[in-house]
Image (tube, grey):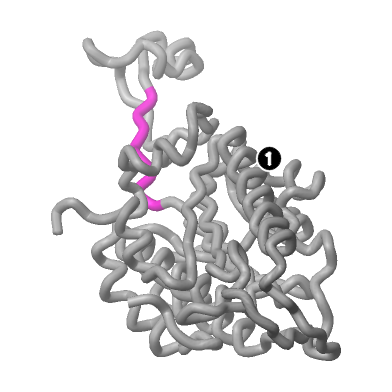
Amino acid sequence: MPARGAYADLNELIALRFPARQLRLARKNRALSVLAGPNKSNFRGRGIDFEEVRTYQPGDDIRTIDWRVTARTGSAHTKLFREERERPVLVVVDQRSGMFFGSSHCFKSVLASQLASLIAWSALDAGDRVGGLVFNGAEHREIRPRRSRKTVLGLLSQIAEYNHALPLPTASAPDSFADMLSNLRRIARPGSSLFLVSDFRGASREHAREHLFQLAQQTELTAVACSDPMEAELPRAGKYVVTNGSERSELHTADKKLRNGYQQRFQQHRDLLSQDMLRLGIPMLQATTNQAPFTLLQQFYGDPRR
C-alpha cells in the first residue's frame, strides 16, 4: 500500500525490515541499466582486498606477480586477493520544507522516509555496512556506516526526528542541495553505494551539478526522485485558497494558460534532471506519493528467488 500521513511513524519504518528482505540492492536488472543510460560509471562493483603473497604457481595471472618479493627471494611470487564482502551503503534523505507537501496518500517527506528505510534494511540484510545523511536545508546529521542493526535504527530515528520537525520556520537556502552534496563528498568513500532520496530541488544549479559529477565518478550513485501528482498538474478547475504559512491568496485553476504553464514548468524540471542523470550514468527512479514505496523498489531490486 502507498505510504500514508503527513508525518513518518518510527514503528512503521522499523517494521519495513520484513518486506525489505525481498529486495536485493546488488542485483542489476535490465530496467535499472536502461535508467543509467549508455554511459559507464568508473565504479566497478565491490573492491578487492590484499590477502597474502605466495610462491607463483602455473596458471596464476602474471599481472599479479609481486616483483619486489620476486627480486628479493630469487623465485617468482604472486599476490593473492579476496573479494571485499562488505561495502559502505549510504542512504541520503531529504527532509527540507519543500518535501512537506502531498495531495495523495502522504507527504513527499514521508515517502522519502519509507524508501530510505526499505533501502537501509535491505542493505543490512545483504551484509553491507549501512550509514546515511539526513538533511533539512539548515543542518544535517551524519551516521557512520556500520554493519549493525543499532546503526540502522539510529538512522531511522534521525529521519523521524527531522521529519517531525517539519515544517521549518524558514525556507531552505537556494544552495542547500549543493551544500548537502558537498558534505556527502566529504564522507562518502570511493566505491560506496549511495542512494539519494529527494525531490532534487536545486539539483540544476551549477555547484550541485559539479558535486553530482564528482560523486558519480567515485561512487555508485542511485537517485530516487520523489514527487506528488499535484506538482505535475493543478487540481480540477475551481477557486482555491492557498497559503505559505504566513500569507494567503486565491488561486483560479480554470485558467488554461495557467494550467498549461504549470505543467510545462514541472515537465521541464523533470526532463532537465533526467538528462543530467543520464549524462552522468546515474539511474533515477521516479517515486510518487500515490505509489507504494515497496512496489517501486521491487520493480528494480526484487529478489527473483522469492
From where the camera sits, is residue 49 visible? no
* Camera-nearest residue between 206 and 120: 206
Residue at the spot 83% in from the left edge and 62% down from the top edge: 174
* Camera-nearest residue between 270 and 131: 270
Q: Which percent across, then down, holds residue 108?
A: 56, 73
Q: Which percent across, then down, holds residue 34?
A: 41, 36
Q: Amino acid at mark 1?
A: Gln
218 lies above or below 61? below
Q: Mark 1 Cα within 10 Å, few/some/many (few <14, many 20+)?
A: some
Give the magenta-colored segment's residue range. 79-86
Residue 79 quadrant: top left
Residue at the spot 26% in from the left edge and 66% down from the top edge: 21
195 lies above or below 236? above
Residue at the spot 32% in from the left edge and 75% down from the top edge: 17
Q: Is residue 156 left or right of residue 199?
A: left
The answer to if 82 sits in the magenta stretch is yes
Number of residue marks = 1
Quadrant location, the N terminus? bottom left
Residue at the spot 58% in from the left edge and 81% down from the top edge: 158
Q: Which percent across, then down, holds residue 32?
A: 39, 43
Q: Which percent across, then down, holds residue 49?
A: 42, 39
6 lies above or below 287? below
Q: Is residue 36 left or right of residue 271?
A: left
SS state under label 1: helix
The residue at which mark 1 appears reads as: 214
Residue 239 quadrant: bottom right
Seen as rendered, the residue at the extreme left is: 305
The answer to if 77 sits in the magenta stretch is no
* Camera-nearest residue between 99 and 161: 99
From where the camera sits, is residue 194 visible? yes
Q: Is residue 26 left or right of residue 160?
A: left
